[in-house]
Each structure stands twice: as structure tokens, then as C-alpha cells.
Image (cartoon, rainbow, N blue to C red):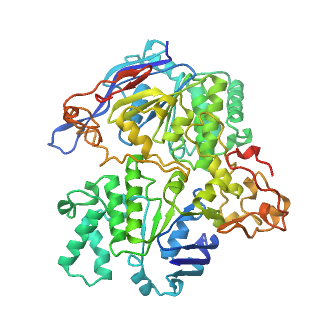
């Protein structure tokens, strides 16, 4: 086990009041495994990543435990945590232009974590930076090392971000929408590069994305989040072929698929509730087409559907009356019957 | 006769970097010919910087095209005077990408939807009220919501208001510039469903501009693929997606992540990024990234030719 996240809850202060952004989030990441986190915007995907890195605003309340290679990093002091960040785990952000420093050369920015975490000499560092630039598939590295971010294209900048993240060979890489800002041909290049790096280094990857296509391409296991909670978790093939939670089904049904022209797409009515105004029972109840009385009053517990496949939904809970749940995933949401 | 016929349209912009530096010409749209039949949808796909938005804007004369012809219902649009153009705008409307930026935050939805009617002097006050209320019904919002402001709506609802605004004057053609790109997939599908319903109901034609190949495939009848200001391939949607001819279209389709983890495909990974439109490569604009490029490609500018029935591609190797 590389990463173990147990009951992590996060509250942020807004207008003088604390509101809960994440609610008892638990999952694991193994070595050499890519775990996808999906959900609509506002579901807490990015906040989960930032909580792992503890890159949180002041006065954030973080509860629960995060263990990286058996070490409970949630107890670490700020200073001790700095030794972990960028070293054992690092992060890639969505927009490479805003996350790179426009006033520093590419080389300086990649070197930074080497200065912080290693005892390399200046010469050794330059060699290492050049190798990193090479590894992420950038051309004419000798000149590139002294260039500034604005001189590079979007795809090249994202490669620089990956080089920075990879500088100290972390065991865990957290990617927050790494290809969302890129064109599809460049996205293909970056995803290919990430797959190569994973195979070489056997690191664990957390891939946050809203693109189900990207999930299908790169992830081994998927966590579906809704309104700050994990609602379903399954291996990737299982999730696409046998989705259980009505939210997961809704997400999958709303993607336009090649070869299904002008057919009605499934959709999920309404929007994600805001943290200040969370429903009492199941948070998806208002938007769910299978809502029952119990959903509105009581929070559903995580139920095991089969090995490695869990969901938090009353439809599958013994107490809620386990209805026949063998419906195919391809039907549109409105025609699903249990 | 097609509803819209665009022939050899060019949209060039000149930019000057510094005070003394030379002018550079950016050929955002460089000789594009397309047509849209009544009640049909033409999808325009391409990566950022390929000129797809500029094409939409110059068709609508929101920027004045450099050269070429745009015919709407057989009538030449370029060179029309202001009064003629105003009449024409009733029939050609646009929906923008960002529903947050394209609705005035200080106006209520009623004001937003009524504005086109007032500008074009349509109906009495009571009639306008009726039109606006029936539009709300069409896009699935309640008429009580007419007094709300844009910020009180979600992204998907806002985009539906943007669509309603485009529909107020009963247009024939709607140019939709990335209308669902800013939306979550669950909301995106609502907007796509709405657009398909409205098309049937009102016999609309769409020019649907998007970088998302699966969305374009879903809504279009015919698709044009653009690269650096030029159309490199155009065909009916099934033909284009099942039998792409141009190496760029092939690469684009193979790069699209498919939401099915059991399907593994061979990918054509293109090298590098889109070259700058200010400094496009010689010959075929795609030759710098093309996996099958030869020496001739750097010299010959390929013409968009009919390679099979109704299927045009601009490549000397197909």
C-alpha cells in the first residue's frame, strides 16, 4: 500500500462560518497503480488532492488520516511536510501557464526541488535537469533550459510541469486535470508520456479529471465523488460496464458516444448542492430518479457490491430493501427500472 | 440552394509587435468554402488557433472579411449596408461559449430576451411579453424566473438563456461557437438535447463550432475539419468518422480518448504542436507534423478536392 486515506474531512471558513467541503473521504492507492477521481465541478475532487498535499488556505480544518508508505503525514509539522512535498509526492496542476513562474527560466524551476531535497552540486543538478527535459520528450534541451515559460507552447509547458514533478522521483504523483487545457492531439502526447513514466518508475498516480474518456484510457481504478463524498469505487472496466450508483450512471449516460448520432443523451437534472446547504440524507437525492423516502432522511452507508466494488446508495443496502439491480448501463436514465 | 454558401472566405489580421517592427499578417481564415443546407448542422472541428471561431465571426460579419463571398439564401452578404445587415441579423444569430461572459449581469432575463425584439421593433409590449414567456417554456425554465439575474442561474441554465436569446427573432441559422465547452458533461448533454429538439421544432440550421470530436459527431450532419485557417477535409458525418482520409483527421480521431476501457487502439501520436498561424509552414500547412509527409508536401499547396462522392480532402497523398 502506497497511500491510505482514511476518513478525511475538510472544513473551510467562509463568511465567518465553517462549511464542510469533504466528508469522510477514504481510499487507497497502490504502487504502480493509477486511480482516477471523477465527478462534476464542485464535487471536491481538487480539494481532495490539495488536502493530501496539505496545500490548504489558512484556518482550514482537516480531520482524518493520510498515510504515505505507512507514515502518517497528517501529523507532520509544516517543516517536516516540506521534506515530503515535491520529494515523495508531487502534483501537476491544470493550467501550466499560471502554475509556472513567468520570471524564472525553465531550468531554475526544475532545479528548485533538487536544491531543496538533494545534496547535488550545481553541475550534477544541470545534468539531471537536462536528463529530465529529455525524459519528458522535449526538443533542443540545451537551449530550452534557459528559456522562459512564455516562450513555450501549452503542451511544452505541461511537459515542464511533469519534469518538475518528476525531479525527485516521487512515489506518488497527483494530477489535477493535467490535460484539460490542452488540445486533443497534445493531450494524447501527454497521456502517452504519463503512461510511459508510470511503467518505468512504478509510481502511484492519482488522476483527477472530468473526462470519462481519459479515465478509460489511463486509470486502473476509479473513485466517483459527489458533493464531497465518495459515492462509488470500482476497477475501471467494472465501473464502465456495471455502474451502480445512479450518479455514476447519469455521468456515463450523458457522454456522447461515437456511432450514436442525434440520439437523446441522458442527463442529470439540477446542480451539485453547495456546502452551506447540504441535504440531510443522501446528497444526490434531489437529482436522483430513483429517490426513496429513506434517501431524504438518512445518509446511505458504503455497501460492497462485489470484491473491490463499493457504492453508497440505499438501492443496494439491505435495510433499504435490496432491489433487483441487474440493469444494464447502456440504457438512458429515464428508462431504467429496478 | 443551400441556406448558407461561403466561398473562398479569407479573414486576415495584421498585427504589429513593437513600434518599429514590421507588420505580420495572421491568416486566421484562409480560403474556406463551406455550405449549410436548410435544417442541417455543419460541424466545424479543429484545435485551438485553427481559425474555427474566426470563421464563425466573419460569416456573421462581426468582423469584416478580407476576401471571398458569403451568400445567405442566395444573396451576397458582404458589402451590404447597415440597414440591410440589420434585417439579415434577424435570420443569423450566434451563441457564445462562455455563458458567464455573454449575458449582461445587470439585466434581468426578461430584459436580456426582450432586447432583440425591441431593437428590431417587433410586436407590441404585450406580444413581446408573450414571445419571451413562450421562449422560457421552450428552454425549460419557468416564466417566474424572468425577473432573475444571470448570476442566479447555473451554467447550464445560463447557456439555455443564451440560446433563447438567439432564438427570439426566429432565425434560420444559428452559429454556435463552442456552446457546451464550459459545461460539465451532465449539463452539456441537457444543452445538446435542447439544441436537437429546437432544430426539429423550428427547422433551424446550425454551424456548430467545437474542439470536441464526440460532441460534433453527435449533433452534426456534415463535418469540416480545419487546420491553420484551411479546411483540410469535409464530408458527411458517418463517412468522416468511419473513413477519415486526411492524415490530420485520422490523427485527431485516434487521439480522442474513448470512454470504454475495454477498447485499446493504435494511436497516431502527432509530433509537436500547432504551428503559429502568423508563420505557417510552406506547402501543405500540416506537413511539419504529418506522419506520411514527403518532400513534395513542403512545396505543393494541396487543393481541397472531391476524393469520393461528397467527401473532400486536401492532401496530395490520398
Residue A15 vs residue A79, the one in the foreground: A79
Instruction: Tell me: residue B206, above or below residue B262.
Output: above
Compared across the picture, whether B128 is left or right of B246 comes to right
Instruction: Tell me: residue B159, above or below residue A314.
Output: above
Instruction: Say which residue appears at 53% left-offset and 78% top-offset.
Output: A1
Q: Is residue A266 visible?
A: yes
Instruction: Say which residue appears at 54% left-offset and 22% top-offset.
Output: B90
Residue A247 point in image, percent of width and height: 68, 56
Q: Quadrant of residue B180?
A: top right
Instruction: Say which residue appears at 58% left-offset and 65% top-offset.
Output: A44
Residue A154 point in image, percent of width and height: 34, 53
Q: Is residue B154 visible?
A: no
Residue B246 vs residue B197, the one in the foreground: B246
Residue A158 point in image, percent of width and height: 36, 59
Compared across the picture, whether B237 is left or right of A120 comes to right
Instruction: Tell me: residue B163, above or below residue A98.
Output: above
Q: Quadrant of residue B49?
A: top left
Q: Check the picture and name the quadrant holding the C terminus of chain B.
A: top left
Residue B189 point in image, percent of width and height: 61, 43
Instruction: Tell me: residue B101, above or below residue B115.
Output: below
Compared across the picture, whether A275 is left or right of A338 comes to left
Residue A127 vs residue B128, the one in the foreground: A127
Count the marks. Answer: 0
Amino acid at each position: 500500500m502506497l497511500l491510505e486515506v482514511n476518513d478525511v474531512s475538510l472544513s473551510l471558513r467562509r463568511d465567518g462560518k465553517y462549511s464542510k467541503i469533504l466528508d469522510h473521504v477514504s481510499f487507497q492507492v497502490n504502487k504502480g497503480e493509477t486511480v482516477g477521481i471523477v465527478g462534476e465541478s464542485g464535487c471536491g475532487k481538487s480539494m481532495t488532492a490539495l488536502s493530501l498535499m496539505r496545500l490548504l488556505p489558512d484556518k482550514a480544518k482537516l480531520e482524518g488520516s493520510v498515510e504515505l508508505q505507512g507514515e502518517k503525514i497528517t501529523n507532520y509539522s509544516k517543516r517536516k511536510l516540506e521534506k515530503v512535498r515535491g520529494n515523495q509526492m508531487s502534483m501537476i496542476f491544470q493550467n501550466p501557464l499560471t502554475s509556472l513562474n513567468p520570471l524564472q527560466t525553465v531550468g531554475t524551476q526544475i532545479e528548485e526541488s533538487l536544491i531543496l531535497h538533494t545534496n547535488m552540486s550545481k553541475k550534477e543538478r544541470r545534468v539531471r535537469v537536462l536528463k529530465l527535459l529529455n525524459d519528458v520528450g522535449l526538443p533542443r534541451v540545451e537551449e530550452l533550459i534557459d528559456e522562459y515559460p512564455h516562450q513555450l507552447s501549452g503542451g511544452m509547458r505541461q511537459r515542464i510541469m511533469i519534469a518538475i514533478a518528476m525531479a525527485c522521483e516521487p512515489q506518488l504523483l497527483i494530477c489535477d486535470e493535467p490535460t484539460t487545457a490542452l488540445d486533443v492531439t497534445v493531450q494524447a502526447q501527454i497521456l502517452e508520456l504519463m503512461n510511459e513514466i508510470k511503467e518505468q518508475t512504478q509510481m502511484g498516480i492519482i488522476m483527477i479529471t472530468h473526462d470519462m474518456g481519459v479515465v478509460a484510457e489511463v486509470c486502473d481504478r476509479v473513485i466517483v465523488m459527489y458533493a464531497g463524498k465518495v459515492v462509488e469505487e470500482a476497477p475501471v472496466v467494472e465501473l464502465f460496464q456495471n455502474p451502480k450508483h445512479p450518479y455514476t450512471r447519469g455521468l456515463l449516460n450523458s457522454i456522447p458516444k461515437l456511432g450514436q448520432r442525434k440520439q437523446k443523451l441522458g442527463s442529470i437534472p439540477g446542480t451539485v448542492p453547495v456546502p452551506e446547504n447540504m441535504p440531510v440524507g443522501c446528497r444526490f437525492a434531489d437529482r436522483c430518479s430513483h429517490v426513496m423516502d429513506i434517501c431524504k432522511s438518512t445518509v446511505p452507508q458504503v455497501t460492497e457490491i462485489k470484491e473491490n466494488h463499493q457504492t453508497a446508495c440505499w438501492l443496494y443496502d439491505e435495510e433499504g430493501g435490496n432491489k433487483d439491480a441487474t440493469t444494464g448501463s447502456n440504457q438512458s436514465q429515464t428508462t431504467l427500472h429496478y | 440552394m443551400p441556406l448558407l454558401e461561403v466561398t473562398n472566405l479569407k479573414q486576415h489580421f495584421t498585427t504589429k509587435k513593437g513600434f518599429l517592427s514590421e507588420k505580420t499578417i495572421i491568416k486566421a481564415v484562409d480560403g474556406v468554402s463551406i455550405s449549410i443546407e436548410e435544417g442541417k448542422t455543419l460541424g466545424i472541428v479543429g484545435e485551438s488557433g485553427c481559425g474555427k471561431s474566426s470563421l464563425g465571426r466573419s460569416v456573421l460579419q462581426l468582423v469584416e472579411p478580407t476576401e471571398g463571398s458569403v451568400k445567405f439564401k442566395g444573396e451576397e452578404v458582404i458589402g451590404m449596408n447597415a440597414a440591410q445587415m440589420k434585417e439579415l441579423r434577424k435570420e443569423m444569430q450566434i451563441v457564445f461559449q462562455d455563458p458567464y461572459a455573454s449575458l449582461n449581469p445587470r439585466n434581468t432575463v426578461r430584459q436580456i430576451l426582450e432586447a432583440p425584439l425591441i431593437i428590431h421593433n417587433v410586436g407590441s409590449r404585450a406580444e413581446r411579453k408573450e414571445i419571451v414567456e413562450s421562449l422560457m417554456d421552450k428552454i425549460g425554465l419557468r416564466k417566474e424566473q424572468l425577473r432573475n439575474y444571470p448570476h442566479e442561474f447555473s451554467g447550464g441554465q445560463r447557456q439555455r438563456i443564451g440560446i433563447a436569446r438567439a432564438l427570439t427573432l426566429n432565425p434560420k441559422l444559428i452559429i454556435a461557437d463552442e456552446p457546451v465547452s464550459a459545461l460539465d458533461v451532465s449539463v452539456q448533454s441537457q444543452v445538446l438535447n435542447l439544441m436537437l429538439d429546437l432544430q426539429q421544432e423550428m427547422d433551424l440550421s446550425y454551424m456548430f463550432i467545437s474542439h470536441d470530436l464526440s460532441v460534433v459527431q453527435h449533433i452534426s450532419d456534415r463535418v469540416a475539419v480545419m487546420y491553420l485557417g484551411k479546411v483540410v477535409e469535409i464530408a458527411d458525418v458517418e463517412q468522416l468518422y468511419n473513413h477519415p482520409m486526411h492524415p490530420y483527421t485520422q490523427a485527431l480521431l485516434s487521439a480522442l480518448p474513448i470512454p470504454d476501457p475495454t477498447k485499446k487502439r493504435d494511436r497516431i501520436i502527432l509530433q509537436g504542436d500547432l504551428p503559429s498561424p502568423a508563420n505557417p509552414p510552406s506547402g501543405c500547412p500540416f506537413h511539419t507534423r504529418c506522419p506520411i509527409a514527403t518532400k513534395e508536401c513542403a512545396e505543393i499547396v494541396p487543393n481541397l478536392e472531391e476524393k469520393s462522392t461528397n467527401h473532400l480532402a486536401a492532401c496530395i497523398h490520398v
